[in-house]
Structures are given as C-alpha cells and as structure tokens.
C-alpha cells in the first residue's frame, strides 16, 4: 500500500509560509531577512551562546554566518563578548533593541496562532488548514485532500 501524503506536504508548506511571512514582513521593515530573524531569535533565547554552538545548533556553515552576524552587530541588535573561561571564544548576546525586536516578531506570530485557535480550535490539522487558507495557492491544491481521503477509504490501514 502506498501512502499519498501530497496534501499534507502542501498543507504544511502553505501553513508554514503564512506563519513565517507574518514575521518576514516586520523584519524586512528593519532592512533584515528571515536569516537575521532566525539568528536573532536563537541568540535571544540562548544568551551567551558561542558562535560555534549557534552555528552547530542552526546547522549552518561559518561562511554562511559572517555577513548575518555582522549586520546584526552593526544594527546593534546583538553584541559579541569574549568568554571569561577562554578569551578566544566569542559569546553572543541580544541588546535591548534586539530583545525588543524578537518580542515584536514573536507577538505577531503568537497573535496569528491565537486568532487561528479562536477560529478553529486547537486541532492541529484544522489549524494547519486555517493557516494554509491565508495563501491563495492553497485553493489550487485542496482537491488533493478529497483524493487522499478516497484513496484511504479504498485502502484501510492494516492493523495487525
């Protein structure tokens, strides 16, 4: 039996796009990108994280981080300090401005989640469909849900 989960894959794509676009619109007004948001969010949640641990946790290369970290420092959203245990180790901290920006971004995303929950409850599938409904392209793929449901009816799960 093959499991066709195209609908769920697209549902997740559209829901994710709605969620991240909420913060993207705000961060772009600061002249920053989604990558800056991810870095700033992580640094704000783990103050004092070393550059090495940040890159390891986010699964990105050192080359891919230099410009992002530099811009966050230049905009005074983060600061870099030498670790007390080893002066060669750099630790990253949010500034007050950085913390305030993270709070603004989080509030926008949290407000969206709250709005969706108020409309459809906390069922994960219903929430994903509501998030996805914000994207015009979701209308183009809704028919996949019916096809998947009819396929599942034809091939009930094998419960051994």
Image (cartoon, rainbow, N blue to C red):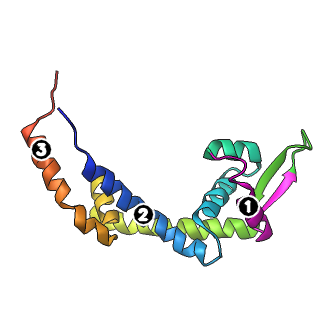
**SS class, disc 2:** helix
Q: Is residue 128 above or below residue 26?
A: above
Res 20 visible: yes
Q: Give the numbered dot on residue 151.
A: 3
Please name which of the two marks, 3 or 1, marks the residue nearer to the observer. Answer: 1
Res 108 visible: no
Q: Nearer the viewer, residue 118 or 7?
A: 7
x, y percent for residue 75: 76, 71
**SS class, disc 3:** helix
Most distant residue in the bottom direction:
29
Which range of residues does the magenta coloring cover? 60-81
| Residue 61 placement, left or right of 138 | right
Dot 1 corresponds to which residue? Answer: 67
Dot 2 corresponds to which residue? Answer: 17
Q: Is residue 95 above or below residue 65?
A: below
Q: Residue at x 70, y 61 (%)?
A: 68
Q: Residue at x 69, y 54 (%)?
A: 43
């Amino acid at each position: 039996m093959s499991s066709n989960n195209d609908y769920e894959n697209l549902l997740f794509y559209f829901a994710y796009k709605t969620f991240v676009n909420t913060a993207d619109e705000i961060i772009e007004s600061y002249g920053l990108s989604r990558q800056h948001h991810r870095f700033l969010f992580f640094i704000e949640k783990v103050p004092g994280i070393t550059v090495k641990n940040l890159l390891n946790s986010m699964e990105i290369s050192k080359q891919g981080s230099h410009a992002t970290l530099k811009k966050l420092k230049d905009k005074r959203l983060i600061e870099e300090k030498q670790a007390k245990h080893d002066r060669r180790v750099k630790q990253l901290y949010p500034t007050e401005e950085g913390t305030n920006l993270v709070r603004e971004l989080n509030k926008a995303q949290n407000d969206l989640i709250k709005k969706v929950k108020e409309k459809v409850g906390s069922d994960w599938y219903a929430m994903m469909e509501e998030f996805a409904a914000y994207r015009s392209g979701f209308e183009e793929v809704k028919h996949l849900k019916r096809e998947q449901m009819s396929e599942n009816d034809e091939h009930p799960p094998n419960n051994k």
